[in-house]
Image: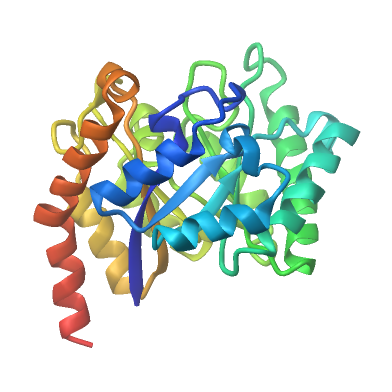
């Protein structure tokens, strides 16, 4: 069992589609906070988007690893659009420069939840096809459900459809505990129910009243989530993020606060488990 902690680019820029060339600042912030990896939406790759070798050099220089790239997809009609497929193939090849890094795939929010089951089946079909192609290229892809009002996989009944249709050989799961609680579910129970699918993990705090919180100030039992992972022998990343207003205005302090919380409340659980191995 080896669990490592990294940061997600959404703490710096929440929107997956806003392009900014701030990767050097992000890497420095992550290193200074004491984290060892990052999961980055592709829109933030900036000058490294077309130069994975240079990106790897900069990560190595800071003692960091690329844990994942986040690439949102729509899967309209059950498959990738030509543009989506071109992007996916490009970033599957990009990830080959970073052994072990995942392709994290949020499903895009639609205009509404009309024809919900049809859209869910389309997303599942497209995700399985993408996951198979990634698998054939040595990359693990993971679907990342989100919980905004028009999301297609928001509630428990949506998750039942999702995991009934996903092919576990080709497509893993990135549980995001904040989005799980926003959907009225218990993150600990979701971890237990879908443990075989979990290949990557996102942590951010929220309340049962659907408010984003600083880590440790919401209603998520992070310790129990980690305990489930520890007992399963999980090997991989826990990627932390925050969606409070402060996250966008004072990001460096926010991730240092998260690191302090992890060191005080989460790392001891992992250390005890390692000592018992």
At x 53%, y 37%, the residue is 145
Give x and y (percent) for residue 21: 56, 30
Q: Is residue 128 visible?
A: yes
Q: How far across and how far down the image is residue 173, in percent?
A: 54, 53
Spot the residue most to the left. 264
Task: Indicate whether 99 appears above or below 247.
Answer: below
Q: Nearer the viewer, residue 259 or 51?
A: 51
Q: Picture quarter containing residue 274?
A: bottom left
Which residue: 85% across, 31% down?
Answer: 77
Say which quadrant the C terminus sits in: bottom left
Task: Determine if residue 71 is in view.
Answer: no
Residue for point 35% across, 37% down: 241
- Location of residue 271 with respect to 112 vertically, above or below: below
Q: Image height check: is 163 above or below 155?
A: below
- Residue 43, relative to residue 197: is it above or below? above
Between 47 and 167, the one lying in front of the other is 47
Q: Report x, y in % for residue 112.
A: 63, 12
Compared across the picture, whether 88 is left or right of 245 comes to right
The residue located at (52%, 22%) in the rendering is: 15
Rendered image quadrant of residue 5: bottom left
């Amino acid at each position: 069992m080896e669990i490592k902690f990294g940061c997600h680019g959404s703490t710096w820029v929440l929107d997956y589609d806003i392009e900014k060339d701030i990767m050097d600042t992000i890497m420095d912030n992550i290193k200074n906070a004491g984290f060892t990896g990052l999961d980055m939406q592709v829109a933030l790759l900036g000058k490294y988007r077309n130069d994975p070798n240079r990106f790897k050099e900069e990560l190595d220089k800071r003692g960091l690893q690329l844990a994942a790239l986040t690439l949102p997809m729509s899967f309209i009609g059950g498959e990738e659009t030509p543009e989506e497929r071109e992007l996916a193939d490009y970033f599957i090849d990009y990830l080959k420069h970073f052994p072990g890094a995942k392709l994290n795939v949020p499903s895009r929010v639609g205009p509404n939840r009309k024809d919900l089951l049809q859209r869910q089946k389309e997303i599942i079909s497209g995700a399985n096809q993408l996951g198979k192609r990634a698998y054939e290229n040595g990359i693990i892809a993971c679907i990342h459900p989100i919980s905004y009002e028009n999301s297609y996989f928001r509630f428990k009944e949506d998750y039942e459809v999702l995991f009934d249709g996903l092919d576990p050989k080709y497509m893993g799961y990135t549980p995001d505990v904040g989005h799980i609680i926003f959907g009225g579910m218990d993150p600990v129970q979701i971890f237990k129910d879908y443990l075989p699918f979990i290949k990557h993990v996102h942590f951010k705090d929220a309340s049962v009243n659907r408010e984003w919180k600083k880590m440790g100030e919401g209603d998520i039992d992070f310790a129990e989530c980690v305990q489930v992972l520890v007992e399963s022998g999980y090997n991989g990343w826990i990627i932390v993020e925050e969606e409070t207003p402060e996250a966008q205005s004072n990001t460096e302090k926010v991730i240092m606060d998260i690191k302090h919380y992890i060191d005080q409340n989460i790392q001891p659980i992992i250390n005890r488990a390692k000592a018992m191995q």
